[in-house]
Image (tube, grey):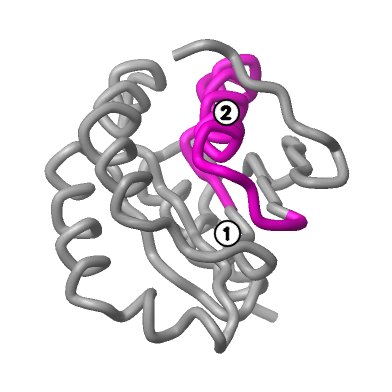
Amino acid sequence: MPQTTFSNSAFSLEYRADLGILIGRWLQALPPPELQGTYQAMLAHAQAHDNCRFWLLDLRRRPLAGPDLNQWFREQFSPQVAAALNGPLFTAYLAGPHQRVAAESAEMELHLRHAATLDSYPLFYDDEAEAVAWLTEQQERAGVRPLKRVVQR
């Protein structure tokens, strides 16, 4: 796929070294080729940051993916990510109340089940703190983040 560029006003991408999390935020809807380009940019950014496999993706300002993007994601991108990052991908998607029907649809359920077969583990959240907590838990389970120690007094 050719490299697609996108405006910083349409998509923001950052790596939070303090959290060990890659954060992508769509600030508006994008046509499919540009949307695919944002995913390719995330993969490149993840590789540049020690193959970061913990992603927080904010979908609240764009529609959830349609059938064409889901097919591309399932058949092309997901297998590419697992191989490129040398391990499973954990993705916390932030979705708004207006996206709940699509996030809980039968089509999305099939997409999520198929993702697990490709070492991709996505979950939907409506609260960013909960999403970050889940990603942190997955880091601890994967042994890439020190376990929190309970201090007793």
Query: Residue at the location (51% across, 56% down)?
Result: 135
Instruction: Reply yes or no: does residue 71 show up in magenta.
Output: no
Q: Quadrant of residue 95?
A: bottom right
First in residue order: circle 1 vs circle 2 = 2
Query: Residue at the location (52% across, 32% down)?
Result: 33
Residue 63 x/y as whole percent:
54, 65
Find the magenta span and give its range.
Answer: 27-56
Residue 141 x/y as whole percent:
36, 50
Query: Residue at the location (63% across, 43% down)?
Result: 21
- Residue bearing the label numbered 1: 148
Residue 91 x/y as whole percent:
45, 51
For label 1, count other residues whose C-alpha is less than 10 Å away and answer few (under 14), some (14-19) or many (20+): few
Relative height, residue 78 to residue 3 (above, below): below
Residue 60 x/y as whole percent:
64, 70
**How far apart are the alpha carbons under marks 1 and 2?**
36 Å
Q: Secondary structure at mark 1?
A: loop
Residue 52 visible, this orientation: no
- Looking at the rendered structure, the kind of residue marked 1 is Lys
- Residue bearing the label numbered 2: 37
